[in-house]
């Protein structure tokens, strides 16, 4: 739970860890789109490991999924 709290508070390393968990189905149901969202947050915070995760996910998601996720990221909170 501590990792979730840290990730929600904006700690890039924790966000990367949550992204990895979703990408690999570790402790949560595998969800590549949710992994992308968390990795993207971590990349925005400067986490290079998350950048690698995003690259790997890009090969697993359809072009349509990627477009939708990119549009979602541009939406204001």
Image (cartoon, helix red, strand yellow):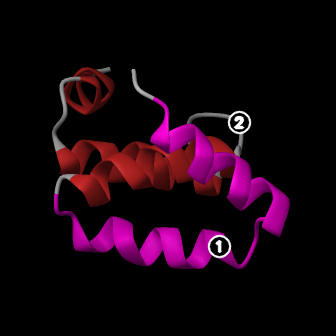
The answer to whether residue 25 is magenta is no
Label 1 – label 2 distance at C-alpha: 19 Å
**Nearer-N-terminus badge (1/2):** 2
Q: Is residue 65 above or below residue 7?
A: below
Q: Is residue 15 left or right of residue 72?
A: left
Q: Residue at x 34, y 53 (%)?
A: 16
Q: Residues within 10 Å of mark 1 (few under 14, many from 20)?
A: some
Q: Circle 2: is it few (<14), some (14-19), or many (20+) Cα within 10 Å?
A: few
Helix, strand or loop at label 1? It is helix
Q: Position of residue 66 (x, y in %)?
A: 70, 60
In the shown orientation, is residue 44 left or right of residue 11? right
Q: Give me the disc on residue 29.
A: 2
Q: Which-is-in-front pick, marks 1 and 2?
A: 1
Look at 25% across and 54% down and name the residue there.
44
- Boundaries of the magenta span: 46-75
Q: Which residue is mark 1?
A: 58
Q: Position of residue 50 (x, y in %)?
A: 35, 65
Tell me if residue 4 comes above or below residue 70 in the rendering: above
Residue 37's x, y, as percent? Answer: 51, 44
Q: Nearer the viewer, residue 27 or 14?
A: 14
59 to the left or right of 14? right
At a point 62% along the width and 69% down the height, the residue shown is 57
Quadrant hosting residue 38:
top left
């Amino acid at each position: 739970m501590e990792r979730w709290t840290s990730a929600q508070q904006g700690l890039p390393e924790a966000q990367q860890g949550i992204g990895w968990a979703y990408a690999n189905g570790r402790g949560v149901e595998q969800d590549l789109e949710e992994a992308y969202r968390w990795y993207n947050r971590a990349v925005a915070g400067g986490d290079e490991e998350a950048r690698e995760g995003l690259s790997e996910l890009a090969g697993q998601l359809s072009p349509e999924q990627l477009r939708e996720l990119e549009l979602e990221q541009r939406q204001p909170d």
